[in-house]
Amino acid sequence: MAVYTDVAAEDLAEFLKGYDIGELLSYKGIAEGVENSNFLLHTSNGAFILTLYEKRVAVDDLPYFLSLMAHLAERGVRCPQPARNRKGEVYSELAGRPAAVINFLEGMWPRRPNAVHCTGVGEALAKMHLAGRDFPMFRKNPLSVEGWRPLFDLAAPRADSVAPGLQDFITRELDHLEACWPKDLPLGVIHADLFPDNVFFLGDKLSGLIDFPFSCNDILAYDVAICLNAWCFETDHSFNVTKARALLNAYGRERQLSEAEQEALPLLARGSALRFLLTRLVDFLNVPPGALVKPKDPLEYVRKLRFHRNVASVRDYGLTQAGCVA
Ligand SMILES: Nc1ncnc2c1ncn2[C@@H]1O[C@H](COP(=O)(O)OP(=O)(O)OP(=O)(O)O)[C@@H](O)[C@H]1O
Ligand SMILES: N[C@@H](CCO)C(=O)O
Protein backbone atom coordinates (compact mmCIF):
# COMPACT_ATOMS: atom_id res chain seq x y z
CA MET A 1 0.00 0.00 0.00
CA ALA A 2 1.47 3.33 -0.93
CA VAL A 3 0.98 5.66 1.97
CA TYR A 4 4.35 7.21 2.71
CA THR A 5 2.90 10.22 4.48
CA ASP A 6 0.10 9.91 7.00
CA VAL A 7 -2.51 12.61 7.30
CA ALA A 8 -4.26 13.45 10.57
CA ALA A 9 -8.04 13.88 10.34
CA GLU A 10 -7.93 17.38 11.82
CA ASP A 11 -5.22 18.51 9.36
CA LEU A 12 -7.21 17.14 6.45
CA ALA A 13 -10.42 18.81 7.64
CA GLU A 14 -8.52 22.11 7.93
CA PHE A 15 -6.98 21.63 4.46
CA LEU A 16 -10.40 20.95 2.94
CA LYS A 17 -11.83 24.14 4.40
CA GLY A 18 -9.75 25.80 1.69
CA TYR A 19 -11.85 24.04 -0.99
CA ASP A 20 -15.47 24.18 -1.97
CA ILE A 21 -15.94 20.41 -2.17
CA GLY A 22 -18.16 19.80 0.85
CA GLU A 23 -17.67 18.52 4.38
CA LEU A 24 -15.30 15.62 4.98
CA LEU A 25 -17.29 12.48 5.87
CA SER A 26 -14.53 9.85 5.70
CA TYR A 27 -11.13 9.12 4.19
CA LYS A 28 -8.80 6.17 3.85
CA GLY A 29 -5.41 5.37 2.37
CA ILE A 30 -5.50 3.60 -1.01
CA ALA A 31 -3.86 0.18 -1.21
CA GLU A 32 -2.42 0.69 -4.71
CA GLY A 33 0.27 2.63 -6.47
CA VAL A 34 3.92 2.91 -5.47
CA GLU A 35 4.93 6.48 -6.17
CA ASN A 36 2.74 8.81 -4.14
CA SER A 37 0.45 8.72 -1.11
CA ASN A 38 -3.19 8.50 -2.19
CA PHE A 39 -6.38 8.77 -0.15
CA LEU A 40 -10.00 8.25 -1.08
CA LEU A 41 -12.13 11.05 0.37
CA HIS A 42 -15.87 11.07 0.81
CA THR A 43 -17.34 14.49 1.33
CA SER A 44 -20.91 15.73 1.38
CA ASN A 45 -20.35 16.53 -2.35
CA GLY A 46 -19.12 13.09 -3.42
CA ALA A 47 -15.88 11.13 -3.84
CA PHE A 48 -12.44 12.61 -4.48
CA ILE A 49 -8.83 11.47 -4.56
CA LEU A 50 -6.26 13.29 -2.47
CA THR A 51 -2.65 12.82 -3.56
CA LEU A 52 0.41 13.80 -1.56
CA TYR A 53 3.29 13.94 -4.01
CA GLU A 54 6.41 12.12 -2.90
CA LYS A 55 10.06 11.81 -3.92
CA ARG A 56 9.91 11.66 -7.73
CA VAL A 57 7.57 14.61 -8.14
CA ALA A 58 9.12 18.07 -7.98
CA VAL A 59 6.82 20.84 -6.85
CA ASP A 60 7.77 22.87 -9.93
CA ASP A 61 6.37 20.12 -12.15
CA LEU A 62 2.91 20.11 -10.60
CA PRO A 63 1.51 22.95 -12.76
CA TYR A 64 2.59 21.02 -15.89
CA PHE A 65 0.70 17.83 -15.28
CA LEU A 66 -2.26 19.31 -13.43
CA SER A 67 -2.77 21.79 -16.33
CA LEU A 68 -2.27 18.97 -18.82
CA MET A 69 -5.15 17.03 -17.26
CA ALA A 70 -7.41 20.06 -17.70
CA HIS A 71 -6.15 20.60 -21.29
CA LEU A 72 -6.75 16.98 -22.27
CA ALA A 73 -10.22 16.87 -20.73
CA GLU A 74 -11.20 19.97 -22.71
CA ARG A 75 -10.24 18.04 -25.84
CA GLY A 76 -12.27 14.96 -25.01
CA VAL A 77 -9.62 12.78 -23.35
CA ARG A 78 -11.22 11.37 -20.19
CA CYS A 79 -9.08 11.98 -17.12
CA PRO A 80 -9.60 13.38 -13.62
CA GLN A 81 -9.69 17.12 -13.07
CA PRO A 82 -7.85 18.93 -10.30
CA ALA A 83 -10.07 20.87 -7.87
CA ARG A 84 -9.15 24.51 -7.28
CA ASN A 85 -9.03 25.83 -3.74
CA ARG A 86 -10.59 29.14 -2.73
CA LYS A 87 -7.38 30.92 -3.75
CA GLY A 88 -7.67 29.40 -7.23
CA GLU A 89 -4.71 27.07 -6.74
CA VAL A 90 -4.69 23.48 -8.06
CA TYR A 91 -2.29 22.34 -5.35
CA SER A 92 -1.14 23.45 -1.93
CA GLU A 93 0.55 21.80 1.04
CA LEU A 94 -0.61 19.14 3.47
CA ALA A 95 1.48 17.20 6.01
CA GLY A 96 4.59 18.84 4.60
CA ARG A 97 3.99 17.54 1.07
CA PRO A 98 2.56 19.17 -2.04
CA ALA A 99 -1.02 17.96 -2.28
CA ALA A 100 -3.84 18.05 -4.83
CA VAL A 101 -7.45 16.91 -4.87
CA ILE A 102 -8.83 15.44 -8.09
CA ASN A 103 -12.26 14.09 -8.90
CA PHE A 104 -12.95 10.38 -8.58
CA LEU A 105 -13.08 8.51 -11.87
CA GLU A 106 -15.52 5.62 -12.21
CA GLY A 107 -14.17 2.31 -13.47
CA MET A 108 -11.65 -0.40 -12.65
CA TRP A 109 -8.23 -1.06 -14.04
CA PRO A 110 -7.97 -4.43 -15.80
CA ARG A 111 -6.24 -7.06 -13.66
CA ARG A 112 -5.87 -9.34 -16.70
CA PRO A 113 -5.68 -7.12 -19.78
CA ASN A 114 -6.96 -8.69 -23.00
CA ALA A 115 -6.76 -7.65 -26.65
CA VAL A 116 -9.92 -5.51 -26.30
CA HIS A 117 -8.30 -3.55 -23.48
CA CYS A 118 -5.17 -3.18 -25.63
CA THR A 119 -7.29 -1.77 -28.45
CA GLY A 120 -8.76 0.73 -25.98
CA VAL A 121 -5.40 1.82 -24.66
CA GLY A 122 -3.84 2.13 -28.16
CA GLU A 123 -6.68 4.39 -29.27
CA ALA A 124 -6.64 6.47 -26.08
CA LEU A 125 -2.86 6.90 -26.22
CA ALA A 126 -2.97 8.19 -29.79
CA LYS A 127 -5.86 10.55 -28.95
CA MET A 128 -3.88 11.83 -26.00
CA HIS A 129 -0.86 12.47 -28.25
CA LEU A 130 -3.04 14.38 -30.72
CA ALA A 131 -4.80 16.36 -27.98
CA GLY A 132 -1.41 17.31 -26.50
CA ARG A 133 -0.22 18.96 -29.73
CA ASP A 134 -1.34 22.44 -28.67
CA PHE A 135 -0.47 22.09 -24.98
CA PRO A 136 1.67 25.20 -24.40
CA MET A 137 3.85 24.03 -21.51
CA PHE A 138 7.12 22.09 -21.75
CA ARG A 139 8.68 19.57 -19.40
CA LYS A 140 11.79 17.62 -20.34
CA ASN A 141 11.59 13.93 -19.45
CA PRO A 142 13.92 13.41 -16.47
CA LEU A 143 13.62 9.64 -16.96
CA SER A 144 14.70 9.51 -20.59
CA VAL A 145 18.12 8.37 -21.77
CA GLU A 146 20.14 11.12 -20.00
CA GLY A 147 18.44 10.27 -16.72
CA TRP A 148 19.21 6.56 -16.70
CA ARG A 149 22.90 6.61 -15.76
CA PRO A 150 22.44 8.82 -12.68
CA LEU A 151 19.66 6.47 -11.62
CA PHE A 152 21.87 3.45 -12.20
CA ASP A 153 24.65 5.06 -10.13
CA LEU A 154 22.28 4.94 -7.15
CA ALA A 155 21.75 1.19 -7.54
CA ALA A 156 24.89 -0.18 -9.25
CA PRO A 157 26.92 -1.13 -6.15
CA ARG A 158 24.08 -3.31 -4.83
CA ALA A 159 22.58 -4.49 -8.15
CA ASP A 160 24.19 -7.93 -7.95
CA SER A 161 22.49 -8.54 -4.60
CA VAL A 162 19.21 -8.58 -6.55
CA ALA A 163 20.50 -10.90 -9.30
CA PRO A 164 24.07 -12.05 -10.02
CA GLY A 165 25.48 -10.24 -13.07
CA LEU A 166 22.81 -7.52 -13.05
CA GLN A 167 25.29 -4.67 -12.74
CA ASP A 168 27.19 -5.81 -15.81
CA PHE A 169 23.98 -6.48 -17.77
CA ILE A 170 22.71 -2.95 -17.14
CA THR A 171 26.09 -1.33 -17.82
CA ARG A 172 26.30 -2.93 -21.27
CA GLU A 173 22.69 -2.07 -22.09
CA LEU A 174 23.12 1.52 -20.98
CA ASP A 175 26.27 1.93 -23.08
CA HIS A 176 24.42 0.66 -26.14
CA LEU A 177 21.27 2.75 -25.63
CA GLU A 178 23.20 5.95 -24.93
CA ALA A 179 25.11 5.46 -28.18
CA CYS A 180 22.07 4.60 -30.35
CA TRP A 181 19.13 6.51 -28.85
CA PRO A 182 17.11 8.06 -31.73
CA LYS A 183 17.27 11.83 -32.12
CA ASP A 184 14.94 12.68 -34.99
CA LEU A 185 11.61 11.08 -34.12
CA PRO A 186 8.41 13.13 -33.65
CA LEU A 187 8.12 14.66 -30.19
CA GLY A 188 5.09 15.65 -28.15
CA VAL A 189 3.33 15.31 -24.81
CA ILE A 190 3.57 11.76 -23.49
CA HIS A 191 1.98 10.09 -20.46
CA ALA A 192 5.14 8.06 -19.79
CA ASP A 193 3.53 5.63 -17.30
CA LEU A 194 0.41 4.27 -19.02
CA PHE A 195 0.35 0.89 -17.27
CA PRO A 196 -2.86 -1.12 -16.79
CA ASP A 197 -3.28 0.29 -13.27
CA ASN A 198 -3.51 3.75 -14.79
CA VAL A 199 -6.29 2.99 -17.28
CA PHE A 200 -9.86 2.52 -16.08
CA PHE A 201 -12.56 0.56 -17.87
CA LEU A 202 -16.28 0.13 -17.35
CA GLY A 203 -16.80 -3.33 -18.81
CA ASP A 204 -14.74 -3.35 -22.00
CA LYS A 205 -15.07 0.39 -22.53
CA LEU A 206 -12.23 2.63 -21.48
CA SER A 207 -13.51 5.19 -18.96
CA GLY A 208 -10.38 7.23 -18.39
CA LEU A 209 -6.64 7.67 -17.84
CA ILE A 210 -5.11 8.55 -14.47
CA ASP A 211 -1.73 9.24 -12.90
CA PHE A 212 -0.03 12.00 -14.90
CA PRO A 213 2.99 12.92 -12.70
CA PHE A 214 5.45 11.41 -15.21
CA SER A 215 3.90 13.19 -18.20
CA CYS A 216 6.41 15.26 -20.15
CA ASN A 217 7.63 16.13 -23.65
CA ASP A 218 9.48 13.30 -25.32
CA ILE A 219 9.45 10.92 -28.31
CA LEU A 220 5.80 9.99 -28.99
CA ALA A 221 6.70 6.46 -30.07
CA TYR A 222 8.52 5.98 -26.74
CA ASP A 223 5.08 6.16 -25.08
CA VAL A 224 3.92 3.40 -27.46
CA ALA A 225 6.95 1.33 -26.48
CA ILE A 226 6.13 1.82 -22.77
CA CYS A 227 2.64 0.47 -23.46
CA LEU A 228 3.97 -2.53 -25.41
CA ASN A 229 5.97 -3.47 -22.33
CA ALA A 230 3.20 -2.77 -19.84
CA TRP A 231 0.28 -4.37 -21.72
CA CYS A 232 1.55 -7.06 -24.07
CA PHE A 233 3.44 -9.54 -21.89
CA GLU A 234 1.78 -12.45 -20.10
CA THR A 235 2.35 -13.40 -16.48
CA ASP A 236 4.61 -16.24 -17.72
CA HIS A 237 6.73 -13.45 -19.33
CA SER A 238 5.87 -14.43 -22.93
CA PHE A 239 5.12 -11.65 -25.42
CA ASN A 240 1.54 -11.70 -26.74
CA VAL A 241 1.66 -10.58 -30.36
CA THR A 242 -2.16 -10.51 -30.64
CA LYS A 243 -2.32 -7.88 -27.90
CA ALA A 244 0.55 -5.91 -29.47
CA ARG A 245 -1.14 -5.98 -32.87
CA ALA A 246 -4.41 -4.79 -31.28
CA LEU A 247 -2.63 -1.94 -29.49
CA LEU A 248 -0.58 -0.82 -32.50
CA ASN A 249 -3.50 -1.13 -34.91
CA ALA A 250 -5.74 0.98 -32.69
CA TYR A 251 -2.99 3.56 -32.20
CA GLY A 252 -2.34 3.68 -35.96
CA ARG A 253 -6.00 4.31 -36.78
CA GLU A 254 -5.79 7.59 -34.84
CA ARG A 255 -2.15 8.52 -35.46
CA GLN A 256 -0.14 6.62 -38.05
CA LEU A 257 3.34 5.67 -36.88
CA SER A 258 5.91 6.74 -39.47
CA GLU A 259 8.33 4.24 -40.98
CA ALA A 260 11.14 5.68 -38.83
CA GLU A 261 9.02 5.36 -35.67
CA GLN A 262 8.19 1.74 -36.47
CA GLU A 263 11.81 0.87 -37.17
CA ALA A 264 12.84 2.45 -33.87
CA LEU A 265 10.26 0.53 -31.81
CA PRO A 266 12.55 -2.33 -30.69
CA LEU A 267 15.17 0.16 -29.49
CA LEU A 268 12.56 2.35 -27.79
CA ALA A 269 11.10 -0.74 -26.12
CA ARG A 270 14.57 -1.68 -24.84
CA GLY A 271 14.97 1.83 -23.47
CA SER A 272 11.55 1.76 -21.85
CA ALA A 273 12.33 -1.61 -20.28
CA LEU A 274 15.59 -0.23 -18.91
CA ARG A 275 13.83 2.85 -17.49
CA PHE A 276 11.37 0.73 -15.48
CA LEU A 277 14.06 -1.77 -14.54
CA LEU A 278 16.12 1.09 -13.08
CA THR A 279 13.36 2.85 -11.13
CA ARG A 280 12.16 -0.51 -9.78
CA LEU A 281 15.71 -1.48 -8.83
CA VAL A 282 16.32 1.79 -6.97
CA ASP A 283 12.96 1.44 -5.18
CA PHE A 284 13.58 -2.23 -4.37
CA LEU A 285 16.89 -1.37 -2.74
CA ASN A 286 15.51 1.63 -0.83
CA VAL A 287 12.11 0.86 0.68
CA PRO A 288 11.60 3.57 3.31
CA PRO A 289 11.26 2.11 6.81
CA GLY A 290 7.62 1.96 7.91
CA ALA A 291 6.20 2.73 4.43
CA LEU A 292 3.24 0.56 3.53
CA VAL A 293 4.43 -0.31 0.04
CA LYS A 294 5.26 -3.45 -1.88
CA PRO A 295 8.06 -2.67 -4.32
CA LYS A 296 7.61 -3.91 -7.89
CA ASP A 297 9.81 -6.63 -9.34
CA PRO A 298 12.80 -5.17 -11.24
CA LEU A 299 13.65 -8.53 -12.82
CA GLU A 300 10.37 -8.60 -14.77
CA TYR A 301 11.93 -5.82 -16.83
CA VAL A 302 15.20 -7.68 -17.35
CA ARG A 303 13.16 -10.39 -19.11
CA LYS A 304 11.28 -7.84 -21.20
CA LEU A 305 14.51 -6.13 -22.15
CA ARG A 306 16.01 -9.45 -23.27
CA PHE A 307 12.95 -10.08 -25.44
CA HIS A 308 13.38 -6.76 -27.27
CA ARG A 309 17.10 -7.39 -27.76
CA ASN A 310 16.14 -10.43 -29.82
CA VAL A 311 13.52 -8.68 -31.90
CA ALA A 312 14.71 -8.76 -35.50
CA SER A 313 12.04 -6.51 -36.99
CA VAL A 314 8.73 -4.85 -36.22
CA ARG A 315 7.05 -8.02 -37.56
CA ASP A 316 7.66 -9.43 -34.09
CA TYR A 317 5.25 -6.78 -32.76
CA GLY A 318 2.53 -7.71 -35.26
CA LEU A 319 3.48 -5.21 -37.98
CA THR A 320 4.16 -6.75 -41.41
CA GLN A 321 6.38 -3.97 -42.69
CA ALA A 322 6.73 -0.28 -42.09
CA GLY A 323 3.36 1.37 -42.66
CA CYS A 324 1.33 -1.87 -42.80
CA VAL A 325 -0.38 -3.71 -40.02
CA ALA A 326 -0.74 -7.51 -40.26
N1 LIG B 1 -9.07 9.92 -10.11
C1 LIG B 1 -9.16 8.70 -9.57
N2 LIG B 1 -10.35 8.09 -9.49
C2 LIG B 1 -10.48 6.87 -8.90
N3 LIG B 1 -9.45 6.20 -8.35
C3 LIG B 1 -8.23 6.75 -8.41
C4 LIG B 1 -8.02 8.02 -9.02
N4 LIG B 1 -6.70 8.33 -8.91
C5 LIG B 1 -6.12 7.30 -8.26
N5 LIG B 1 -7.04 6.35 -7.96
C6 LIG B 1 -6.80 5.10 -7.21
O1 LIG B 1 -5.57 5.20 -6.54
C7 LIG B 1 -4.68 4.17 -7.00
C8 LIG B 1 -3.28 4.71 -7.02
O2 LIG B 1 -3.22 5.86 -7.84
P1 LIG B 1 -1.98 6.15 -8.75
O3 LIG B 1 -1.82 5.07 -9.78
O4 LIG B 1 -2.13 7.54 -9.25
O5 LIG B 1 -0.82 6.03 -7.65
P2 LIG B 1 0.69 6.42 -7.71
O6 LIG B 1 1.36 5.87 -6.51
O7 LIG B 1 0.80 7.90 -7.92
O8 LIG B 1 1.08 5.76 -9.03
P3 LIG B 1 1.88 4.59 -9.70
O9 LIG B 1 2.49 3.74 -8.67
O10 LIG B 1 0.87 3.86 -10.57
O11 LIG B 1 2.81 5.41 -10.49
C9 LIG B 1 -5.23 3.76 -8.34
O12 LIG B 1 -4.93 2.43 -8.70
C10 LIG B 1 -6.73 3.91 -8.12
O13 LIG B 1 -7.21 2.79 -7.43
N1 LIG C 1 4.38 1.91 -13.44
C1 LIG C 1 5.64 1.84 -12.72
C2 LIG C 1 5.51 2.35 -11.33
C3 LIG C 1 5.15 3.80 -11.28
O1 LIG C 1 6.03 4.55 -12.04
C4 LIG C 1 6.16 0.40 -12.67
O2 LIG C 1 5.35 -0.51 -12.87
O3 LIG C 1 7.33 0.21 -12.42
Image (cartoon, rainbow, N blue to C red):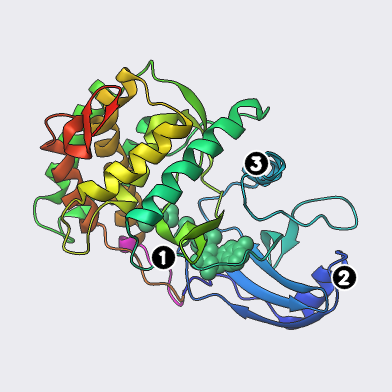
Comes first in the chain, label 1 or label 2: 2
Q: Residue at x 9, y 50 (%)?
A: 165
Query: Magenta region's main secondary structure?
Result: loop
Q: Amino acid at mark 1?
A: Pro
Q: Residue at x 22, y 64 (%)?
A: 235
* Residue extending farthest top: 184
The residue stretch that appears in magenta? 284-291
Mark 2 near mark 3, Cβ–Cβ under 8 Å?
no
What residue is shown with label 3? 72
Give the Cα distance between marks 1 and 2: 35 Å
What residue is shown with label 1? 110
Q: Is 147 located above or below residue 10 in the figure?
A: above
Quarter of the rendering containing residue 310: top left
Left or right for 227, reference 73:
left
Where is residue 326 shown, x and y percent of the image?
23, 34
What secondary structure is marked by label 2? helix
Left or right for 139, reference 109:
right
Which numbered circle lies on residue 8?
none
What secondary structure is marked by label 1? loop
Choose between 319 and 111: the one closer to the eye: 319
Q: Nearer the viewer, mark 1 or mark 2?
A: 1
289 in magenta: yes
Label 3 CB less than 8 angstroms from ligand 1: no
Where is residue 251 shown, x and y percent of the image?
42, 37
Which numbered circle lies on residue 17?
2
Choose between 255 and 262: the one closer to the eye: 255
Q: Is 76 located above or below residue 280 in the figure?
A: above
Comes first in the chain, label 1 or label 3: 3
What secondary structure is marked by label 3? helix
Q: Residue 133, can we see it?
A: yes
